[in-house]
Image (cartoon, rainbow, N blue to C red):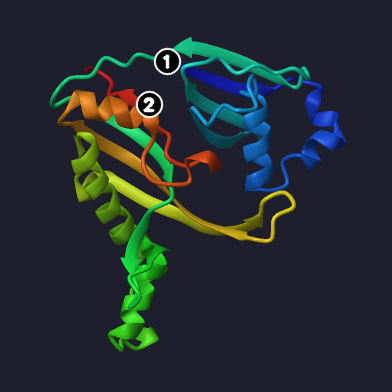
């Protein structure tokens, strides 16, 4: 596997047409696909994370392949990505994820709800007056942590409530190219410490991502060894 850092070439920031290509999450999604577009029949086989550094976009990608830029816009810096993992290993992490809950309606149809809106809807259903609701930041922290802890059980890591911060909750709506169907994505940023409980399953999470919306920049967990370990 490779971890690639993708940054703008120095003169690309002067290209107005380029900035139009970064208008929303779907356009960013298409831009990243273009760096892996060696075969029109290929399904997505990479994860990515979008960050802003010095007011310019930076991407981190994990894939079995090295991305290729045919337009000379990007500096691509690939490195082999083969983390050494063991049971009880402590790591710091960051993750942008799309935490959801899946529920069935009376007709047994599945519906996805982001965990924050799901918690707010539950408060409404329980008849809790809005003035008595927790602050949204408190809902994000509580619901985000519970979602991450469940994912930890699935993917071989453990987190503690006092070692995880969940914030940066945001919702985005956009249309795919020439599409009439609106895409809704809610994301939460997670940072903190974790403990590896199953190295094999945790490696699967690092390579394959956590949660849905991976094609739109969610699910790539970045990890670091703690100093002195």
In this view, the residue in front, 215 or 124, is 215
Q: Is residue 176 above or below residue 201?
A: below
Mark closest to the chain's N terminus, 2 or 1? 1
* SS type, badge 2: helix
Name the residue at the top extreme. Answer: 80
* Residue at 31% over, 86% down: 128
Crowdedness of circle 1 by 10 Å Cα count: few (<14), some, many (20+)?
Answer: some
Q: Which residue is mark 2?
A: 207
In this view, the residue in front, 41 or 102, is 41
The C terminus - image quarter? top left
Marks 2 and 1, how far apart in space? 8 Å
* Residue at 56% over, 36% down: 50
Asked if one can make out residue 54 in the rendered structure from this viewpoint, the answer is no
Crowdedness of circle 2 by 10 Å Cα count: few (<14), some, many (20+)?
Answer: many
In this view, the residue in front, 99 or 129, is 99
Disc on res. 91? none
Tell me which corner region of the image, top left, top right, bottom left or bottom right, holds residue 204.
top left
Image spot of residue 219 (x, y percent)? 42, 39
The N terminus - image quarter? top left
* Residue at 26% over, 45% down: 151
Image spot of residue 86 (x, y percent)? 17, 20
In this view, the residue in front, 226 or 149, is 149
Tell me which corner region of the image, top left, top right, bottom left or bottom right, holds residue 122.
bottom left
Q: Is residue 164 above or below residue 200?
A: below
Q: Which residue is mark 1?
A: 1
Q: Are marks 2 and 1 in contact (CB under 8 Å)?
A: yes
């Amino acid at each position: 596997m490779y971890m690639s850092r993708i940054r703008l070439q120095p003169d690309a920031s002067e290209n107005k047409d380029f900035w139009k290509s970064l208008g929303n999450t779907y356009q960013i999604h298409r831009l990243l696909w273009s760096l892996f577009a060696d075969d029109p029949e290929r399904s997505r086989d990479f994860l990515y994370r979008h960050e802003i550094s010095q007011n310019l976009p930076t991407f981190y990608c994990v894939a079995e392949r090295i991305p290729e830029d045919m337009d000379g816009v990007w500096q691509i810096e690939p490195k082999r990505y083969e983390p050494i993992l063991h049971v009880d290993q402590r790591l710091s992490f960051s993750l942008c994820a799309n935490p959801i809950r899946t529920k069935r309606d009376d007709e047994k149809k599945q519906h996805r709800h982001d965990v924050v809106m799901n918690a707010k809807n539950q408060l409404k259903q329980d008849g809790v007056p809005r003035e008595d609701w927790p602050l949204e930041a408190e809902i994000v922290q509580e619901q985000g942590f519970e979602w991450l802890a469940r994912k930890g059980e699935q993917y071989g890591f453990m987190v503690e409530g006092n070692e995880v911060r969940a914030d940066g909750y945001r919702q985005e709506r956009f249309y795919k190219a020439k599409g009439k169907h609106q895409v809704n994505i809610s994301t939460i940023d997670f940072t903190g410490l974790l403990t590896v409980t199953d190295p094999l399953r945790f490696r699967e999470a690092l390579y394959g991502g956590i949660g849905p919306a991976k094609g739109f920049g969610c699910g790539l967990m970045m990890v670091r060894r703690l100093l002195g370990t």
